[in-house]
Structures are given as structure tokens and as C-alpha cells.
Image (tube, rainbow, N blue to C red):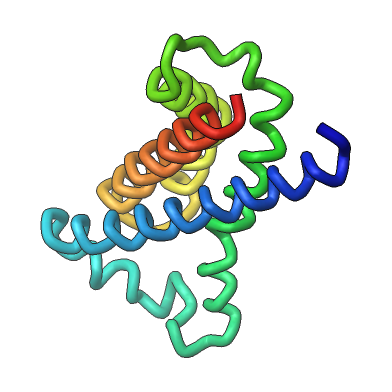
Amino acid sequence: MEGGERMKKNLGLGLLAGVGILIIEMLATQLAGLFVPGYLTEIQNGQIFRPWTDPLMMLFFVYPFLIGVIFAWFWNFIKKIVKGKTALEKGFNFAVIYFALATIPGMFITLSSFQISFFMVLVWAISGFVEVFFAGWLLAKLNS
């Protein structure tokens, strides 16, 4: 596959992963609101987070697509070393690698430096793992 074709494929897969990540983010927020007392109130705290009326909050919806495209690009470098016989196993192992390298340190510094609850950080960590698992599965399935 030539460079231009590969770039188009990566972009398409990344955007597709982004759609899934956005859906997972939205579902995780709603589920956390149902099962974690005070979660929705905490994420609406204007002392910590921007209000939804702030135009910069539109960037929140760009994030899943940005990370999806980055995952699609990165997958090309590591797909041969991610272990697993099935796309599901490879997706899980990809998520474990990402979780160890990025999520654990990110959530550690988040918990230590922001005045947010442990449960909020836990929700973010779990939903982040599920998002990366989905992206890894998708990429393993469609770009092996």
C-alpha cells in the first residue's frame, strides 16, 4: 500500500475509532451518573471545569477523533508486537499497554493535583481503558 493510500486508511480507521470512543465516553458519563453519587454534579463544577456554554468546550468533541487518528497511526508501528490470536485479544493487550503507559500516570497526576474525587478518576480510568480496548479491537480487526 502506498503512502497516500495508507494515510487515507489510517485517517478513516482513526475517525471510525473516534466515533466509537465518543459513544463510549457519552455512555460512561451517563452510567457513572447513575451509579456514582455526585458524579454529574462534580463534572458540572464551574470552579474546576469549563461550562458547556464556553466555546472551547467544543474541543471536547474533537478529542475522541484526535486520539482515534493517533491510535490508528501508532497501531502501524506496534501491530506486529501486540500479542493475541484474535482481534479481541490484541485489542485487550493494546489497551493494557496504553493503560500502563498513559492512563495510570495520567490519573495519578490528576488525582494528586486536581480537587476531584477518587471516584471521578476511577470512572475516567475505567472508561479510558474501555475506549482504548475498543480502538485496539477495531484496528486489529481492520488493519492487521
Could you say which is closer to the camera, residue 73 or residue 99?
73
Return the x and y of residue 113 as percentages of the image width and height: 49, 51
Residue farthest to the bottom, as pictured? 53
Determine which quarter of the picture holds residue 75.
top right
Tally of numbered discs:
0
Towards the viewer: 131 or 1: 1
The image quadrant of residue 79 is top right
The residue lying at 58 percent from left, 57 percent from top is 65
| Apparent side of residue 96 relative to residue 130 in the rendered image (left or right) | right
Q: Which of 29 and 88 is in front in this view?
A: 88
Where residue 22 sits in the image (x, y, percent)?
43, 59
Image location of residue 13, percent across then percent down: 60, 46
Q: Residue at position x 52%, y 41% from top?
A: 106
In the image: residue 123, left or right of residue 103: left
Which residue is located at x 45 percent, y 72 percent?
A: 49
Which residue is located at x 46 percent, y 45 percent? 112
Q: Given the current orientation, which residue lies at the most extreme right position?
A: 3
Q: In this view, does 86 lie above or below 41?
A: above
Quadrant in which the N terminus appears:
top right
**137 or 141: nearer the eye?**
141
Q: Residue 58: x percent and y percent? A: 55, 77
For the C terminus, the quadrant is top right
Picture quadrant of residue 40: bottom left
